[in-house]
Image: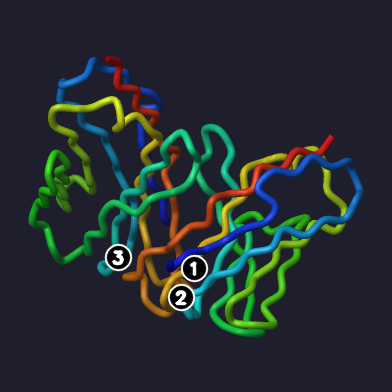
C-alpha cells in the first residue's frame, strides 16, 4: 500500500540556517510521482515541485533543492539560507495510478518555523 | 485567473443540520477531489470525480456525499454532520485523473466546526 512518512513533526531554526525536510515513501509500483506542497499560515496549499520515478536528478530552484533517492525511497527537501517567509507546513505526497484513477497520498506534514 | 474556489471559507454548525460546501474550478479540469486535513494525519481523500457524473469513494467517505453534474462544480454534502467531521476541507482539481503525473490545484480551504 502507498504510504508517505514525514518523521519530523516540527522543526524550528534561526533565519539563514539551512534546513532539510525528510520524506520517505512506500510503494510497490514502478511508475509514480512525488510532490511537495507548502501550506503557509494563510492556509492554502501551494504546489512546489513534481518528480517522476524515472528521473533521479536532483533539482534546484533558488534556495530550494530536492534530493530524490530511489534506493532509499526518499525525496528530501532542503531550504538553504532560510527566511522567515519560509515558515509553513510542508507536505510530501505520492501519486500513483490505482484502480483506474490518480491517487494522491500525503505525509503528515512538517511544521517549519524560521525564527528571526 | 486560474483557480479553485470554495464556499464558505468558515462554517460553524450544529449536529445533524445538513450543509453543502461548494467547489468550483475555472481550468476545465476533468478530475476533482475532496480532502480533509486533520492534525497529525495530513490530508486524506474523501471522494473524487474523474469527470461529469463519475464519482468514487476515497479513503474516508463515511458521512459525506458528492455530485458532479457540471464539469466545473463538485459540491461536498454533509447530510447529518457530526462533531468528528470538524476539520479543514480542501477541494482540488487536476487536468485529468488517468495519469498520476498531473499536480492537483487546491482551493483555499473550508474550516468546518460541528458542535
* Rendering coords of residue B2 (x, y %): 43, 68
Depth check: give the residue in front, B11 or A107: B11
Q: Which disc, if any, is residue A69? A: none
| In this view, the mark in front (2 or 1) | 2
Q: In this view, does B88 lie to the left or right of A29?
A: right
Q: Is mark 1 on a helix, strand or loop?
A: strand
Q: Which disc, if any, is residue A32? A: 3
Quadrant in which the C terminus of chain A appears: top left
The residue depicted at 29 percent of the width and 25 percent of the height is A84
Tell me how far mark 2 sits from mark 1, CA to CA: 9 Å
Pointer 2 and pointer 1: residues touching (CB < 8 Å)? yes
Q: Is mark 2 on a helix, strand or loop?
A: loop
Residue that carries the numbered disc 2 in the rendered image: B27
Query: Alpha-carbon neighbours of circle 3 within 10 Å: few (<14), some, or many (≥20)?
Result: many
Q: What element carries label 3?
A: loop
* Rendering coords of residue B21 (x, y %): 72, 58
- Does residue A16 sit above or below B44 in this rendering? above
Tell me how far mark 1 sits from mark 3, CA to CA: 18 Å
Pointer 2 and pointer 3: residues touching (CB < 8 Å)? no
Depth check: give the residue in front, B26 or A5: B26
| In this view, the mark in front (1 or 3) | 1
Tell me how far mark 2 sits from mark 3, CA to CA: 24 Å
The answer for which chain carries disc 3 is A
Depth check: give the residue in front, B60 or B7: B7
Q: In which quarter of the image is residue A51?
A: bottom left
Query: Alpha-carbon neighbours of circle 1 within 10 Å: few (<14), some, or many (≥20)?
Result: many
Residue that carries the numbered disc 1 in the rendered image: B93
Amino acid at each position: 500500500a502507498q504510504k508517505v512518512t514525514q518523521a519530523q513533526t516540527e522543526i524550528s531554526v534561526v533565519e539563514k540556517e539551512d534546513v532539510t525536510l525528510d520524506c520517505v515513501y512506500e510503494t510497490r509500483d514502478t511508475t509514480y510521482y512525488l510532490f511537495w506542497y507548502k501550506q503557509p499560515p494563510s492556509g492554502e496549499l501551494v504546489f512546489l515541485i513534481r518528480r517522476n520515478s524515472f528521473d533521479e536528478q536532483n533539482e534546484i530552484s533558488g534556495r530550494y533543492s530536492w534530493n530524490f533517492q530511489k534506493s532509499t525511497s526518499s525525496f528530501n527537501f532542503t531550504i538553504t539560507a532560510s527566511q522567515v517567509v519560509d515558515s509553513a507546513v510542508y507536505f510530501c505526497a505520492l501519486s500513483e495510478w490505482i484502480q483506474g484513477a490518480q491517487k494522491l497520498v500525503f505525509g503528515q506534514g512538517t511544521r517549519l518555523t524560521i525564527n528571526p | 485567473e486560474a483557480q479553485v474556489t470554495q464556499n464558505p471559507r468558515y462554517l460553524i454548525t450544529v449536529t445533524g443540520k445538513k450543509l453543502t460546501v461548494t467547489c468550483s474550478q475555472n481550468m476545465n479540469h476533468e478530475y476533482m477531489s475532496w480532502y480533509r486535513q486533520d492534525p497529525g494525519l495530513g490530508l486524506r481523500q474523501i471522494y473524487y470525480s474523474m469527470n461529469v457524473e463519475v464519482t468514487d469513494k476515497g479513503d474516508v467517505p463515511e458521512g459525506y456525499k458528492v455530485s458532479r453534474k457540471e464539469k466545473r462544480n463538485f459540491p461536498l454534502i454533509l447530510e447529518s454532520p457530526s462533531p468528528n467531521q470538524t476539520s479543514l476541507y480542501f477541494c482540488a482539481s487536476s487536468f485529468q485523473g488517468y495519469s498520476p503525473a498531473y499536480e492537483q490545484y487546491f482551493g483555499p480551504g473550508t474550516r468546518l466546526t460541528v458542535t
